Amino acid sequence: MKFKLIALDLDGTTIDRRLHLSDANRDAVNDVIRQGSIVAIITGKMFAAALPFAERFQGSAYLFASNGANVYDIPGQKELISFPIRAEHLPPIIHTIEKHRALYRMYTRDAMFATEESHLVDSIRRDYPNLPVFIGPIPLSETYYKIYVQDDDDKLAAIARDLQSLPLQIHPSDNHNIEITNAKANKGEALRFLKQHLQIATEDVLAIGNHDNDMPMFAESGYAVAVANAPAYVQERAHMVTRHCEEDGVAYALAQLGICRMDPII
C-alpha cells in the first residue's frame, strides 16, 4: 500500500506513556517521508508541547495541535488557521467544571493555566519543564485552545451533559479525562481541511491513533490503524490493529503495510 498523506496521533500512539519516541518509530516515519509521503501530526497536545515532537521527524509537514485548534505549516513556520474556544463560552464552561469540583487545566497556544496546585499541574511541570505555568484565578482575557479535565467518569459525564447545549467538541483522549475545544477543533475536521488544502483523496490517507478523539480522523481516512492499547470500540473502527504503543506499534504498522523499508518483525 502507498499513501500520499499519513496522519499520526502522538500520545499513546507514536510516543509511549513516558513521552518517549522510540528509534524504531522515528526511523519508520522518516523513511516514509523520504519516500514522498506527507506526514501530519494531529494531536491533542497543546502547540508548545507538540512542536518539539513534530520537529524530531525529518520533514514532517503539518502540526495540528489541541485536536486541530492550531493548524501549523512546519516548513513554512506559519499558522494556517486557528480555532480558539470562543470567549463568551469560557465562563459557563469554567462554572460547570467547578460546579462538579473536577480538576482541570487550560491551554493557550504556549502556556498552561490552573486555579490551584494539583497532580495535573505537577505532571505538566515534570514532563514539560520549559512550559510557562500560571496558578490562580483564570484570566479570561487570554485566548484558550483546549481545556483538559480529569476526574472520575461520573463527573466527566455530568460535565459533558451540562455543556451539550454549547457548540463545543468534547472527547476523551485517555482514561478518566475529557478535552474541551471549539466545535471546529476535532481531528476529523483537521484531516478534512488538510485533504482539501493538499487536494488529496480520502483513499490516499492513512491515519494511526489510539482513542476516542482519533475516531473522527479515522472516518476521514482511507485506511485506519489502531494501536493495541486502544479501547476495544476504537479498535473496532480501524482496518488494522497494530502493536502496543510501548512496542513500536507505528513502525510495525508501517512495515506491515509495506510503506516503509523496515523489517516488519521489529
Image (spheres, grey):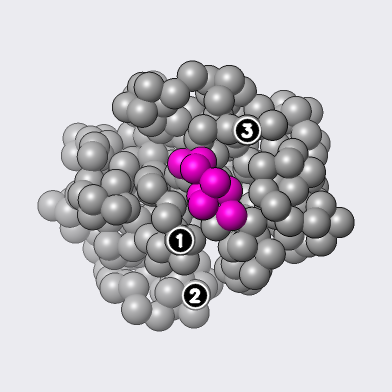
Residue tagged 3: 2
Q: Report the span colored magenta.
A: 31-38
Q: Mark 1 or mark 3, which is nearer the start of the sequence?
A: 3
Relative height, residue 263 to residue 226 (above, below): below
Viewer-proximal residue, 245 or 145? 245
Q: Mark 3 or mark 2, which is nearer the start of the sequence?
A: 3
Q: Mark 2 or mark 1, which is nearer the start of the sequence?
A: 1
Instruction: Please tell me which residue is depicted at 51% across the width and 33% down the height of the picture.
Output: 4
Q: Quadrant of the C terminus?
A: bottom right
Residue tagged 1: 58
Please state if 199 lies on the left or on the right of 56 as rendered. left
Please say if the residues under marks 2 and 3 sit with CB atoms less than 8 Å apart. no
- Circle nearer the viewer, 1 or 2: 1
Give neighbour class at mark 1: few <14, some 14-19, many 20+ (Cα, 10 Å).
some
Helix, strand or loop at label 3? It is loop
Instruction: Please tell me which residue is depicted at 59% across the width and 54% down the height of the picture.
Output: 31
Q: CA distance from mark 1 to mark 2?
A: 23 Å
Q: CA distance from mark 3 to mark 1?
A: 19 Å
Please say if the residues under marks 3 and 1 sit with CB atoms less than 8 Å apart. no
Helix, strand or loop at label 2? It is helix
